[in-house]
Amino acid sequence: MAHVKHQKWWGWGEEGVFFNYENKPAFAPFVKEAIGVTLRPRERDTVDFSTANVPASKAPDSVLELLREINGADNVSTDDELRVIHWAGKSVLELLQTLRNDFHRIPDVVVYPGTEDEVTALMRAAVEYDLVLIPFGGGSSISRSLQPDPAEERCIVSVDLGRLNKVLEIDETSGLATIQAGVLGPDMEEQLNARGWTLGHFPDSFTYSTLGGWAATRSSGMQSDKYGDIADIIRGLRMVRATGTVVLRPLPSTSTGPSLREMIIGSEGRLGIITELSVHVHRLPEKHQVIAYMYPTWQQALTAVRQFTEAEIPLAFARVSDAHETAFSLATQKAPTSPKSKLAAKGQDALWAVMRKRGWDTDDMCISYVCFEGSPKDVESRKKAVAGIAKKNGAIVLGSGPGALYDQKKFDTPYLRDFLLEQNTVGDVSETAAPWSKLTTVHKAVYDAAERAYASLGKKGWIMSHMSHSYHSGACLYFTFGYVYDDENPYDEYHTVKSAIQQAFIDNGGTLSHHHGVGLEHQPWMEQDISPEGANIMRALFSSTDPGNNLNPGKVVS
Amino acid sequence: MAHVKHQKWWGWGEEGVFFNYENKPAFAPFVKEAIGVTLRPRERDTVDFSTANVPASKAPDSVLELLREINGADNVSTDDELRVIHWAGKSVLELLQTLRNDFHRIPDVVVYPGTEDEVTALMRAAVEYDLVLIPFGGGSSISRSLQPDPAEERCIVSVDLGRLNKVLEIDETSGLATIQAGVLGPDMEEQLNARGWTLGHFPDSFTYSTLGGWAATRSSGMQSDKYGDIADIIRGLRMVRATGTVVLRPLPSTSTGPSLREMIIGSEGRLGIITELSVHVHRLPEKHQVIAYMYPTWQQALTAVRQFTEAEIPLAFARVSDAHETAFSLATQKAPTSPKSKLAAKGQDALWAVMRKRGWDTDDMCISYVCFEGSPKDVESRKKAVAGIAKKNGAIVLGSGPGALYDQKKFDTPYLRDFLLEQNTVGDVSETAAPWSKLTTVHKAVYDAAERAYASLGKKGWIMSHMSHSYHSGACLYFTFGYVYDDENPYDEYHTVKSAIQQAFIDNGGTLSHHHGVGLEHQPWMEQDISPEGANIMRALFSSTDPGNNLNPGKVVS
C-alpha cells in the first residue's frame, strides 16, 4: 500500500528486530530480583495475523467511492491488518488490547493522501458526510491519541500521512527547513544530513515517529536541551481544515495575539491536519561526544545538572539515571567478549573498589550522561566546565566509553516492552516535568505511589527514573515501571499503577506529561493540570472550530 | 486615587521630565537636514487639563454603586483626567488624538481592584450587566490595545491593576518568582533586586509598563536574547474569568495539548484578566558590560550577529543600528564639557580618520552594542569570542565608553516624541521580525515604502532602523520614522506612512509586529499575517469564550 512503512501490527518496530537478554548475563537475575519473574528465552518471533479477530469495516460503499475519488484507489484500504495497525499507538495498554483482540472500535478505512489538496478534500468530505478523521504519523503514540471512541457510530477514517515525506527546502542562511508532516525521523534526517544539516530532534520513538506527529503531540527529543522541544523548533506550518488552510509563515518570533502556532502544536488532530512545517535546522556538528559520570547520590547529580544550566554551558543533553535505573543499566551490559570490553569490565571492577573506598553506598549511585556538540575546541572547554561542576558535586568521570554505548543503543528500549509482554510482564513509562525545588518530592512521591499501588494489587513491582531534559526552572523526570500482570484483569491493574503515578505527578507540582501528549490516556488529569476553567477554554476552542466533532473527537479534553 | 502612579495625561512619563536638545549641538542641524524642520526650544512644560474637552461619563448610578461595593468607594472614579489617562496608550496617533481633543469614546469609569476576588466580582458584573472591561497596566501601549470602540454604547470600565503590585514569592532553587500582574517594571525590579534577583525584562517602555501588560501584549525586552521574550519567561499564571479562574502552575515545559499559556499570553484582555504570574528570575549578574563596535556596512554587522548565535555565545543582547540610526545616534551626543568627554571627542575624531584611511564610507557605517553578563571570567571570554567574529566582519571595537552611554539613556527615547509633537513633527516606531535570509530585503523594502509614502504626501521624511533581538532563524528589525505633520489632516497621513511600512513587513516575509502586539493598530494585517483561516480560529476562540463580547472587544481580531 502506497510504499508507506508500517510497524508490526502486534508490537514495536519492524518484524525481525527484538530485544535479547541472552548476551546480558546480569539481566535475568536482575529481573528475578526486581519483580520475581524467571525470564524465559524469547519464543515469539512474530504473531500470525490470522489470530486477530478484527471487527468488520463499517465504511459505506458511497464513502469508499468518494475516498477513492479523492486519494486514488491505490491509496484507500479496508484491509484488516492495515486497519489494526492504524487503530492504536504502542502503549503497553494498547499492545495488550491488540494481542488480546480487544479491539472494540477500529478505523473503517485507511487513506494515504499524497497532496495537500487531497487532505483538503478529505476534510471537506468529513464535514459533508459526517466522517471521523484521525490523522496517523508513525503510530508510536503511547498516550492513546489514535484510538477511536469505542462508542463511535460514524465511519472512521485513519488519515496516514506517510506519503508526505519530503524535505522541500532548506533556507541555509536562516537555518530553516520546510518539511512535509508525514516523514519518519530517519528518512527526514537522511535528507537533511545529505546536505549537511540536522533537525536534532531524537525522541525515543525516533525510528517510528513523524515530524507531524511530534508537532501534534508536543514531542521532545533526547537532545532538546540544545535543539529545543518541538514547539521551539517549529516556526511555521500549514494546517488543513474544511474551511481553508491555516498558513503560518516561518517567523523567529511574533506578537500576533494568542499564539496560533502554539494552539496547533499539541492539538492532536482536533483543529485540522498539519501537512507541512517550517523548522529550525542546524549544521551537523563537527564533533558529538557523550561522556558518562557517576555520582554518589541522586540529589548531588540533580544539583550538578541544575548548576550546568545556571552556568549557561551549551550542552546537547545532560541526563541522570536514579539509583534504580543505574542498577538496571548496569544489568543490561553485555558480557565482555572482545579484549577491549574485557579490559573495560576490569576497569569497572577497579572503579567500584574506588567508590567503596570513598565511602559510597553503591546502591545509591547514579549514572549520568552528558552530550557535547560543537567544534573540538568548544567540546573540550565545555567538558572541562562540566567536569568541574560534576566533581564539586562528588562525581567520578567515567569517560566516553560508556557514553558511546548509551548513544548506540538509545533507540532500542521500546523493543523491551514486547519481550516482557511475552513473559506476562508489563514494562511501561510515564513522565512529567516540575520545578527544580519540587523534583526530589515528585520523585519520592512517585516511588511511594507506585509501591502503594503494587501493594494494593499484592504484587512485587519495580520503578526507576531518569532526569531527561532540563530547563532554567526545572526538569523532566521519566519513570519506567514494571510488574507481572494478571491475565484475568490486566487493564484494571494497569490503570491502578499508572493512575497512582500520574496522580503523584499532579499532587506534587508536576505536569501530567512533559512530552508524551494527552490523548485519552492522560485526559482524566487535564482539569487538575490546567484547571477546570482552563479545560473549559480548551473545550470551547475545539467545539467552536469543529462543531461537527469530526476531528479526532474526544482527545485532549472530553 | 489608590496610590497608583500614572503618566502625564498628554504625553509620555512623568510631569517635569523632558527631552532636551540644547546640550546636543549636532541635533538641530541633523533634524533640519533630515526632515527640514528648524527646531525651537521646548515651551511646553505641561498641558493644562482644563484645555481638554472630555466626554461625560455614561456610567449609570446603579453600575457605579455596584463597582463601589466591589472595589470600595476610594477605588472607583469617574474623574475626567483619570478617564482620559485610561482612554489610550502612547502611540503618536493616540497622543495626537489626545492633544487635539479627539476622544470619541473613553472609559466611563476607572476601577482599581485590590484583590483577585475583586477582579472576579468585576468579571461577573461585566457579564451580568453587559459592561465592557478593558484591563489597564501602565498605559504604555503603542498598538491601541486600550482604546474603546468609538461606537461602543455600553458602559466601559477601565480596570487598572496598579494596586496588584507585589512580588509574592521567590523560589530560589528553581529561579521562579510569583508576582502580581499590575506591578510596574521599576517597582518589580526593586523588590527582586533587594533579594539578589532580576527578571531581566527591559522593554523601552520599562518605566511605565507592567508585568501583566507585557504578558497580555507579548512583550520583548532589550535583553531578551539572554532572558527570553515574555512568553519564554512566563511559566504559570492566574487569569480571572466570570466563570472561574484559569490556574496554570509553574512548569518548565508540558505537553498538555494546545498551550493554554500561549493562548493567554498576547490575548490583550480578550480571554480574561491576568492577576498573577510565575516567571523565570535570575541571580543579578556579577558583571554587566556593554561594548560598542563600528562596522563598515549594515550587511557585515548583520552577518556578525548571526554568527554570534551560530557560535552559541551567551549574550544579553547584540544590537545593530543601520547607517541612518548610527548618524542619528552620533547627532544626539552631548557637547563635551568634562576633560574626560573632551578626550573622548578627540578620540572619536581620530577614529573617524582611521576609518576613512581604511576606505570606509562613513555614511554607511553602523554602530553595534553587545551586552555581556556573567562572571568577570565569562564576560572576558565572551568579549574575546565576539571581538573575533566582529573583526572578521570588518568591525572596529569602540569599547565600553559608548556602550555605557547607551546603557544609561536607554529608557529616555519615548520622551523625544512629545518634544517633536510640539514642533508639529511625528516621530514614531514600527517593528517586525523575519528570517535572516529576508532581513536585508525587508529593510530595503521598508525604506522604499516609507520614501514612496513621503513622496505621495509631498513630504521630506526620515527613516532609520536597528536590529534589536536575534534568534536562531532570524531577528527583529525596529524602525523609527519621522516627518512634519499637517495640522489639517494628521491622521490620514499618519496612516499612509505607517501602513506603507506595515505592508512592506508582510509583503517581504516579516510579521506585523515582533513585540508591540496587535490592538486596533495592527489588526488590519492579521489575516495577512496568520492567514484568513488562522484569523477565523482566533475569532472562534474569542467568541466562544466571551459570547457577550464584554472583554476588551475588537482587539487583536475584529
Image: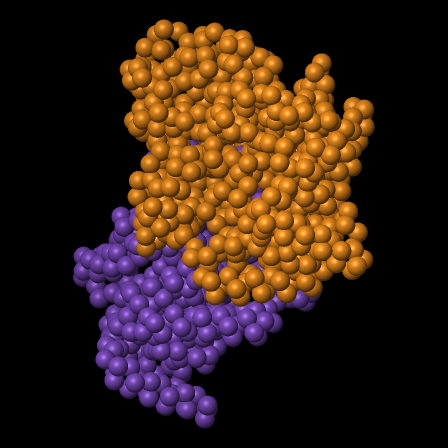
Chain colours: A purple, B orange
Q: Report the front residue among A167 and A438.
A: A438
Vertical relation: B101 (above or below) A287: above
Residue B411 seen in render: yes
**Quadrant in which the N terminus of chain A is drawn:** bottom right
> Which residue is at a point 48% across and 77% down the rendered structure image?
A404
User: Which quarter of the figure has residue B426?
Assistant: top right
Residue A56 seen in render: no
Q: Report the front residue among B112 and B442.
A: B112
Q: Residue B108 in the image: state x and y as whole percent.
A: 44, 12
**Quadrant in which the C terminus of chain A is drawn:** top left
User: Which quarter of the figure has residue B275?
Assistant: top left
Horizontal side, residue B277 vs residue B289: left or right: left
Q: Report the front residue among A13 and A436.
A: A436
Q: Residue A442 in the image: state x and y as whole percent.
A: 28, 55
Horizontal side, residue A369 vs residue A464: left or right: right
Q: Residue B447 in the image: state x and y as whole percent.
A: 75, 38
> Which residue is at a point 34% across and 7% down the rendered structure image?
B62
> Which residue is at a point 53% across and 20% down the rendered structure image?
B46
